[in-house]
Image: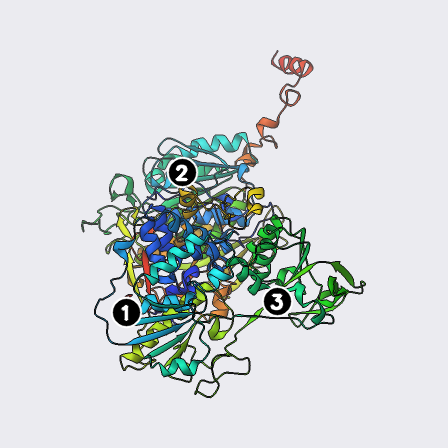
Amino acid sequence: MQPTDIQDPNYFHKVVDCQWACPAHTPVPEYIRLIAQERYTEAYMLNWDSNVFPGILGRTCDRPCEPACRRVRTEEKPVAICRLKRVAADNKGDISAFMPRVPQQKNGKRVALIGAGPASLAVARDLLPLGYEVHLFEKDPSGGGMMRSQIPAFRLPIEVLEEEVDQILDMGVVCHFGQEITSMKAMLDQEFDAYFVGTGAPRGRDLELPGRAEVDEYIHIGIDWLSSVAFGHTDSIEGKVIVMGGGNTAMDCCRTSLRLGAESVTVVVRSAFEVMKASEWEKEDAMREGIPIINNRPPKEFVHENGKLKGVVFECVKPVEEDGRLKYVPSGEPDVFIECDHILMAIGQDNHCPWIERDIGLEFDKWDCPVLDEVTLQSTNPKVFFGGDSAFGPENIIWASAHAHQAAISIHLMLSDKDLKKDRPPEGVNLLSTKMGVHEWAYDAEHDPSARHLVPLVEKESALSNVKVEVELGFDRALGEAEAQRCLNCDVQTVFTENLCIECDACVDICPMDCITFTENAEEDSLRQRLTAPADNGEQALYVSTDLPTGRVMVKDEDVCLHCGLCAERCPTNAWDMQRSVVHVPQLGSFAE
Amino acid sequence: MTFVAKPRVHHPKLPLNEIGLTRRDYEGSVSTLCAGCGHDSVSAAIVQACAELSLPPHRFAKVSGIGCSSKTPSYFLNKSHGINTVHGRMPSVITGANLANRDLYCVGVSGDGDSASIGMGQFAHIVRRRIDMLYIVDNNGTYGLTKGQFSATNDKGSTSKKGVPNLYEPIDLVSMALQIGASFVARSFSGDKRQLVPLLKAGLKHRGMAFIDVISPCVAFNNHQGSTKSYDHTRQHTENVVNADYIEEHDEITADYEPGTVEDVAMPDGSKLRLYKLDENYDVHDRVGALNYVQRRQEEGEVVTGLLYVDPDASDCHEILDTVHRPLNELQEVDLCPGNDMLQTINASFR
């Protein structure tokens, strides 16, 4: 294999599995260390800089970081990263001194943001400090988008939402709330210098089955229903409720129904439990509240009598694996009838931009998604950019933040007459030694074997009695500090300097995870099998040195390294050093600009 | 010296051996030797050898004298018996242990100071008596614990860290062991586990006195230019003649050596030693020839490594003394007291 190029910003970035998996590339280990040091404000600001909504995300994030956490591979359960983010948000002090300064004197460029969801808000945050005049258009009376309308208050208290939305609005956004945009043409006529569309994926899917038209009154589209609960238009649901669908919206619908007085709530899912789109913890939360989830039951017919819904007939299927994919075949059991009075339909949502005329040079693809450049997020109309769910279909808040950073860079480059691709700021990496002295490191190297800490919950009865009571109490400071110790500090890298190595094997002998091998070089496949422990996880890189005096190379499998620093501790010549890698992810207002 | 404790967590695919233990179960406490010390590699090699042989740790007696080398039994086989004895007196103590319980795996770890200076007499006599044990010398040619004076195995002309040459002839423990009765004599290098681990396995399984001289550089005081026991010098001047591996009946080749001439030697317990001869003219069963070869190459500044001599059928101390076949702690009164009739007979024979 060729020697590893550790100057490549992606090499060590990939080793920080959580940060790599995060769409916004939040520097997770760094903020976890700050929490361990009780520097909550700094931990919050580090998050805020990168993902814009730490308090909100600390409760609602889809957590792509957690399944990626190295701890899953070394010991099973990931660090509770999301909950630690909330610890930072809950305990932060006054952040006003850390907020970016917004110049009084504007730069003369006007940008319109359509939709006041997380994507638009994050674009506003990135552009305002550079002097842009930012106008925000929203049909609802207040900002927040789906974070307000679709996430129930028992998961995201309204104060938390408003605090972080207002932080941005207060930076000087010109708000046009309660104004639904009905024509993009008319918007373009207002001659803003750039437009950003962050209107989400607002259309909930429906199901055309026999009986659908007759029982319209009793069938509610999940996201619309949640929104009417959020804005106080709906405050109860009576009788037996069936929630159809297996995503996070379905979980929010069933748990909300339970709180609004439903006699019983049942979730019925077309597919198998394991492949449901809902996050693991959201399924667990629903089940803990006693809501049954019935799988492998595609609906067949709505049954009604005298115009009133009686229930739904479901087919029975079973999953069969074919060519690595799940297919569903009839299981042979007779159809089942489940009685109900209301149905909440949560089977997915789509992009929907009927207000964008199709003759203004803005192309849409066959799935009705705008045609975009994946890097710049620019549409076929060079002045119009998209982000969040309206760009590539439904994702989540953290993706909205990530898109926003890219769109903001693009807008800024365009309005500075630069090329959106060639002039894009590059990624970078800095390596800083953490060696403080003999046996002293600037990070907590010791491995903590504790199991993942459970989050305390509010008592079930009071949780179910009020839709606004937040279910998770979150970690207190002590639990937060304990959980922070579980982080393996994957951003403190094992950096190897070939010409210092005397090949004494001390690092090989001490490594608790058998990561290090000195061997003859070979092609990657054969090398992976010849190491002290076979490196079977092809997703994880091998760190290969140049040739050493004995003709061998040092090979380190990054897969299960604990970053405990023992190789560096035992190295007599400092050929190993523990160096903190700081990945620079380009972002307006951050390092590159 | 390391202050960060080695985490208990291990590689998720770390294999279990035949008795259900992982290699990590054979480790000891974290080493307090200097970082990069060759002795730690020797300890790691012992851990690996014992784990691969699936030997039960509680059947071991590990005994050492005084010195850096003699600290190392703390760093392997945590769950075994051990004594850190008086300087140079490891042989006496391990002789007692072995005579009392012949079923134990006796491992003695000593250093060049402990064996070639203060313990010279003890060394000579335990080899001569052919105690059934594995005698390892971590040989770094220096008194590391007292800041780097020349030891008795330091080569004449080799310099100290400050450049002062050694004026005296070295003692070669391998030659001595060959001369006075060891039935398994080997030399290896701490930086070459591929050779050392199979040798340790063979030595552990050999019945009788197995002696391995391991060149184990002292990174603090004897790893400079001018030293003949540094990592670099050893790598440049070793000549490997015969590698060995211990093969149990059910497993096949484990050592990955370059193909050469292979010879299997039957061991008394039915298993075998597999020898990989890198020098075809070398006869591993010729004691006098081995002695000559080692000394001649030494004159030429080369260090001969590998399994240098083996006699798998040689007798050990128990056989020589015709001792009882069971450990002493298993003998009951009925075994030890011949009874009144026998006593009367014995007494009568003196009348």
Task: Give the CA separation, mark 2 to mark 1.
Answer: 72 Å
**Residue at the disc numbered 1:** A592
**A457 lies above or below B284:** above
**Residue at the disc numbered 2:** B124
Colour pattern of the rendering: rainbow
The x, y position of residue A127, in whole percent, is 31, 70
Q: The disc labelled 2 sits on which kind of residue?
A: Ala
The C terminus of chain B lies in quadrant: top right
B143 vs A299, left or right, is left
What is the number of callouts on the image? Answer: 3
A454 vs B187, left or right, is right
Q: Report helix, strand or loop for mark 3.
A: loop
**A517 lies above or below A206:** above
Categorize mark 1 by other alpha carbons within 10 Å: few (<14), some (14-19), many (20+). Answer: some
Chain identity of mark 2? B
A434 vs B248, left or right, is left
Given residues A236 and A321, the one toward you in this image is: A236
Q: Report helix, strand or loop for mark 2.
A: helix
Q: The disc labelled 1 sits on which kind of residue?
A: Ala
Q: The disc labelled 3 sits on which kind of residue?
A: Ile
